[in-house]
Amino acid sequence: MIRSLAIAACGLLLSGLAQASALEQFKTFVASTKAAKGEFTQKQVKNTNGEAPKVSTPATGTFVFARPGKFIWTYVKPYDQVLQADGDQLFIFDKDLNQVTVKKLGDALGSSPAAILFGSNDLEKNFTLSEAGTKDGLEWLKAVPKAKDTSFEQITIGLRNGLPEAMELKDSFGQTSVLSFRKIEKNPALTATSFKFVMPKGADVFNNN
């Protein structure tokens, strides 16, 4: 009887650890990662009524970030575009058009998907976090924005061995952005000017501050 109770207790303990693993992995990642860089692949999945989902051509690129609110998100294929934030402003550079849009970073980062990877450590201020089970060999975490004016309904993050390997962002229009991450390097050497945006020569600038 005692042995069976002990086995049951161990089973409950292991079950509890499994349920908590995604959240624990992610909180450890956030707490121990002040900066990171890596590569990504992104595709859009659009759900249509009664038809097979439409999947966009995958986009690939690189990223580097430093908390809080500094990042460079570079699309390489199938188009060249850079999203760069210096902690104060967000610069969106379309290389083909040689066009730069400048926006105030401000509180807009708080409930955005970028805040999960690039923001401050205070995630639970802007998101309700919960476990989302196991899929594709990853432990998944669900993050629901607390703000009502965000365009995203929910974000899920797949983790393995303490690193985020996938992210799915579901918006209010039935579209899901699916991202996968690879070659993540934690806390690389960065300088004070790593995130300073250098305005391209001759670029058209649209300031939305």
Image: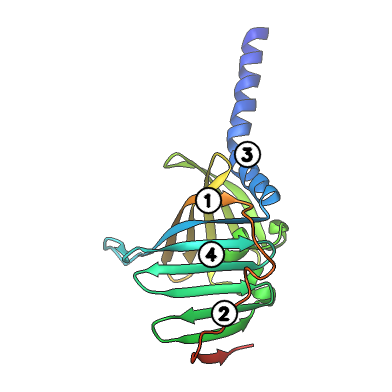
Q: Residues within 10 Å of mark 1 (few under 14, many from 20)?
A: some
Q: Are marks 4 and 1 in contact (CB under 8 Å)?
A: no
Tags 1 and 3 touching, CB below 8 Å: no
In the image, which is nearer the foreground, mark 2 or mark 3?
2
- Distance from label 1 to label 3 (Cα)? 23 Å
Mark 2 to mark 1 CA distance (whole Å): 23 Å
Choose the circle earlier in sequence order: 4 or 1.
Answer: 4
Q: Earlier in the sequence, mark 2 or mark 3?
A: 3
Quick check: 193 above or below 183? Answer: below
Point out the frontmost of discs 4 and 1: 1
- Residue 37 vs 133, above or below: the answer is below
Tag 4 secondary structure? strand
> How dense is the environment of label 3, judged by Cα within 10 Å: few (below 14), some, or many (20 and up)?
some
**Which residue position holds label 4?**
153
Label 4 amino acid? Answer: Glu
Residue 60 in the image: state x and y as whole percent. Answer: 40, 63
Q: Which residue is mark 3?
A: 20
**Amino acid, disc 2:** Phe
At x 62%, y 32%, the residue is: 17
